[in-house]
Image (cartoon, rainbow, N blue to C red):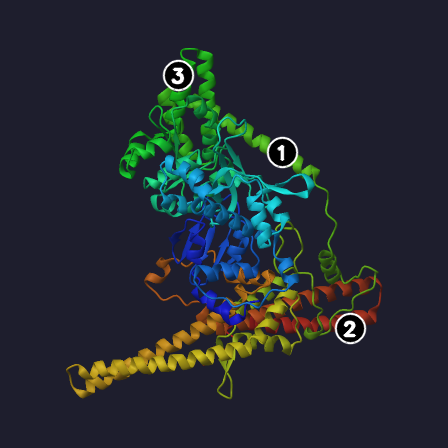
């Protein structure tokens, strides 16, 4: 476990923009930063990061949270593992109690696989650089290929010894479990329950995730004359899906973002050689066909891809499908054909970074021109082949999501192929219409295959409250006063993504608004009491609700209020410590300011005036810091809370999708929400009370109707009297909602 003080220290040091930028390319827009969401197929930036609030949120898929939540989701870590990740990033020492056997067992399987891969990478690296066999075989191979030791260390290259169980024996000796050696694909089972190294006798290329964790390995056999694959990769596992990984992405991501372009090559050595020559914005698909997952990984950092091809025409044609996938993902693609007999590995070794980059810039071409020239060479003058090629090219253009880009490419295609633009456009529209129809058919089929879900308990509870009937037919008696109104416990705190139709309590939006004020401003001073002390926002809300015995219907909302109350003592200690720190700081600043003023020329009256002004400014600055602490305390506490239901709800409550334009504040001061709390919070409470009354009045009116039909005159009279009283109370509340309720002191 990590104590709250250490968590506070970690979160104080954490800059969420820095954390998210390790994985997503962000651009500032207004007060926040925006980028493509890493959690779904995002076409336009919908992922917002607020540096001031320390939270992020995708306004498309809904995922987000604090820096902790982002790391938990992105790296698939537990809460405490994510905290330790951030602590390592910001060099904060974390003291933990010794884990018990049970706690060790509970560590996630994924984390265990990452740990054993990290051990294996270290083992292979030491074998390469520190053993006679490794230096004589593996290091000699890398030196022969022209790689220096800096590149070898940068990419964690290594060597797996010829002995068939060298890694296995060392891992077992260190206490690692056989289960994870097999699950990661580092070893395989043999006879007599023995395990053997999968990569024995190979030079090793670790595959790193975008965050720098080893997810897999590629191994190259060095012996000749053996009828097995030259390269061999780790099998797919819980932590490695080759369709979502790119070789070199961890080492290249910063350069890709800086250069605003990613070079895409085929193999490990292409990446290594280009890095060694000074070109770092390069990744490889590792010999596999390019996949949508790999393209989206690049798209996090840039929208521009340049594909580098060697002179192998057959290989180029086989990889054209990858170009179509890049287009479909909405990226800008250029293609470069290297000189005959050259590949990125060999060509980069004969060039400097400047000359290689210059060659790329002068030879890169758009995919239409490249594909046209490549395919028309085979077609010759055969009109049928030419028609097929034209259709093929238009098919590629039809995949582009942006209508303007499609139009530009159609114009270019028309010019190159000397075909009427209207004809090409007509064919393109037919292709897109057919694709849309196919997609629609698939969706209809998928929908028809779904099994209707059973009504859940929450929906039944809502129905019970609204109709006044229980499942056994017993009638729910009507409430006779505001404090008697039953709580509807059906409203979920955060709507599940898979259940958009789940019913929500009609009171939820009013309760949610009050909880939002508590999370955002809970420890802010709101009203001054008769004794001269100040009532906090959360205290006022709780007191007002208790007057009418109102309990919030949502369990998460109630838990937030309970946790807020529990944090009172800790908050007061923190506030007291900050107040003392600011007092000393202010005194020091004031002393320095007065000394400076007294050294200046001028009469005494003028100096005294400056001293008073300096004292006022320093006091105001300290007061603003105290107010900032009070405002942010609960927001920071709840957005980093270990229970993800609580913390993600808090993030949702504090996230702002829209911001006031500077146009509105240029010529006049616009009153902010925090400046109007004295007015807004009482109004929100009265709106909740009014909603409860509306719900109660509807129940009574329904019972009046039933009593009338049953000709129960006495009951009708009683219910009518209750209805009149409640309507009078509703009128009073309506006036209070419409007017300013409390004047600030």
Q: Quadrant of residue 440?
A: top right
Q: Please give the name of the residue rendered at 30% of the width and 36% of the height, measured from the top-left corner.
A: 357
Q: Where is residue 321 drawn, in percent x and y?
A: 48, 28
| Whole-number angstrom distance, CA of label 1 to CA of label 2 | 59 Å
Instruction: Assess whether mark 2 and mark 3 are in contact (beta carbons under 8 angstroms).
Output: no
Q: Where is residue 160 drawn, in percent x and y?
A: 51, 41
Work out whether mark 1 precedes mark 2 in sequence or the reverse, and give the earlier one.
1
Q: Is residue 701 above or below residue 304?
A: below
Disc 1 residue crowd, few under 14, some 14–19, many 20+, Cα 10 Å:
few
In the picture of the structure, the residue carrying the numbered disc 1 is 442
Q: Relative to residue 708, is residue 224 drawn left or right?
A: left
Work out whether mark 3 precedes mark 1 in sequence or the reverse, and give the earlier one.
3
Q: Please give the name of the residue rendered at 39% of the width and 58% of the height, measured from the top-left corner.
A: 31
In the picture of the structure, the residue carrying the numbered disc 3 is 377
Q: Quadrant of residue 238?
A: top right
In the picture of the structure, the residue carrying the numbered disc 2 is 718
**Residue closer to the observer: 102 or 246:** 102
């Amino acid at each position: 476990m990590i104590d709250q003080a250490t968590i506070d220290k970690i979160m104080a040091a954490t800059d969420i923009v820095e954390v998210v930028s390790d994985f997503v390319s962000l651009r500032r827009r207004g007060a926040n930063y925006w980028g493509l969401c890493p959690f779904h197929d995002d076409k336009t930036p919908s992922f917002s990061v607020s540096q001031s609030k320390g939270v992020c949120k995708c306004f498309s898929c809904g995922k987000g949270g604090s820096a902790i939540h982002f790391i938990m989701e992105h790296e698939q870590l537990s809460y405490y593992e994510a905290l330790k990740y951030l602590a390592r990033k910001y060099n904060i020492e974390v003291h933990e109690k010794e884990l018990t056997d049970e706690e060790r067992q509970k560590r996630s399987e994924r984390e265990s696989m990452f740990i054993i891969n990290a051990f294996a990478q270290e083992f292979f690296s030491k074998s390469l650089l520190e053993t006679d066999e490794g230096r004589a075989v593996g290091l000699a191979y890398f030196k022969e290929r022209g790689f220096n030791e800096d590149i070898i260390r940068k990419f964690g290259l290594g060597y797996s010894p010829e002995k068939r169980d060298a890694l296995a024996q060392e891992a077992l000796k260190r206490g690692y479990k056989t289960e994870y050696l097999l699950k990661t694909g580092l070893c395989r089972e043999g006879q007599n329950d023995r395990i053997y190294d999968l990569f024995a006798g190979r030079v090793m290329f670790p595959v790193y995730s975008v965050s720098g964790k080893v997810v897999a390995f590629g191994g190259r056999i060095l012996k000749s004359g053996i009828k097995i694959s030259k390269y061999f990769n780790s099998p797919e596992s819980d932590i490695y899906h080759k369709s979502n990984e790119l070789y070199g992405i961890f080492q290249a991501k910063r350069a890709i973002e800086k250069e605003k372009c990613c070079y895409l090559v085929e193999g490990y050595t292409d990446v290594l050689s280009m890095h060694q020559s000074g070109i770092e914005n390069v990744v490889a698909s590792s010999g596999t066909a390019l996949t949508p997952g790999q393209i989206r990984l690049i798209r996090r950092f840039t929208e521009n891809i340049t594909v580098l091809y060697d002179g192998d025409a057959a290989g180029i044609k086989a990889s054209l499908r990858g170009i179509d996938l890049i287009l479909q993902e909405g990226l800008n693609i250029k293609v470069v054909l290297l000189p005959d007999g050259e590949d990125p590995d060999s060509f980069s070794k004969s060039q400097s970074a400047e000359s290689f980059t210059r060659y790329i810039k002068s030879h890169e071409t758009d995919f239409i021109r490249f594909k046209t020239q490549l395919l028309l060479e085979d077609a010759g003058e055969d009109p049928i082949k030419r028609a097929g090629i034209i259709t093929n090219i238009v098919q590629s253009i039809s995949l582009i999501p942006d209508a303007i880009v499609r139009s530009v490419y159609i114009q270019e295609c028309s010019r190159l192929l000397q075909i009427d633009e209207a004809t090409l456009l007509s064919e393109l529209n037919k292709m897109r219409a057919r694709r849309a129809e196919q997609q629609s058919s698939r969706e209809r089929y998928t929908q028809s295959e779904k099994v209707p879900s059973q009504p859940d308990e929450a929906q039944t509870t809502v129905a019970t409250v609204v109709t006044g009937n229980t499942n056994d037919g017993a009638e729910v008696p009507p409430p006779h006063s505001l404090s008697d109104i039953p709580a509807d416990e059906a409203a979920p705190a955060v709507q599940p993504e898979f259940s958009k139709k789940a019913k929500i309590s009609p009171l939820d939006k009013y309760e949610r608004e009050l909880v939002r004020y508590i999370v955002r401003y809970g420890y802010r001073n709101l009203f001054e009491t008769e004794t001269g002390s100040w009532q906090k926002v959360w205290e006022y809300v709780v007191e007002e609700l208790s007057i009418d015995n109102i309990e919030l219907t949502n369990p998460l909302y109630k838990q937030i209020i309970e946790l807020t109350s529990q944090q009172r003592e800790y908050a007061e200690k923190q506030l007291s410590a900050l107040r003392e720190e600011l007092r000393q700081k202010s005194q020091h600043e004031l002393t320095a300011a007065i000394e400076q003023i007294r050294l200046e020329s001028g009469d005494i009256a003028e100096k005294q005036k400056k001293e008073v002004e300096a004292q006022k400014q320093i006091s105001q600055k300290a007061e603003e810091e105290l107010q900032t602490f009070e405002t942010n305390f609960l927001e920071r506490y709840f957005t980093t809370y270990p229970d993800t239901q609580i913390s993600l709800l808090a993030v949702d409550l504090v996230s702002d999708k829209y911001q006031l334009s500077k146009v509105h504040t240029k010529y006049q001061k616009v009153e902010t929400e925090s400046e109007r709390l004295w007015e807004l919070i009482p109004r929100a409470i009265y709106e909740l009370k009014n909603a409860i009354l509306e719900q109660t009045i509807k129940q009574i009116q329904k019972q009046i109707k039933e009593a009338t039909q049953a000709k129960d005159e006495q009951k009708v009279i009683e219910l009518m009297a209750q209805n009149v009283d409640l309507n009078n109370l509703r009128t009073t509340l309506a006036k209070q909602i419409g007017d300013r309720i409390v004047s600030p002191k």
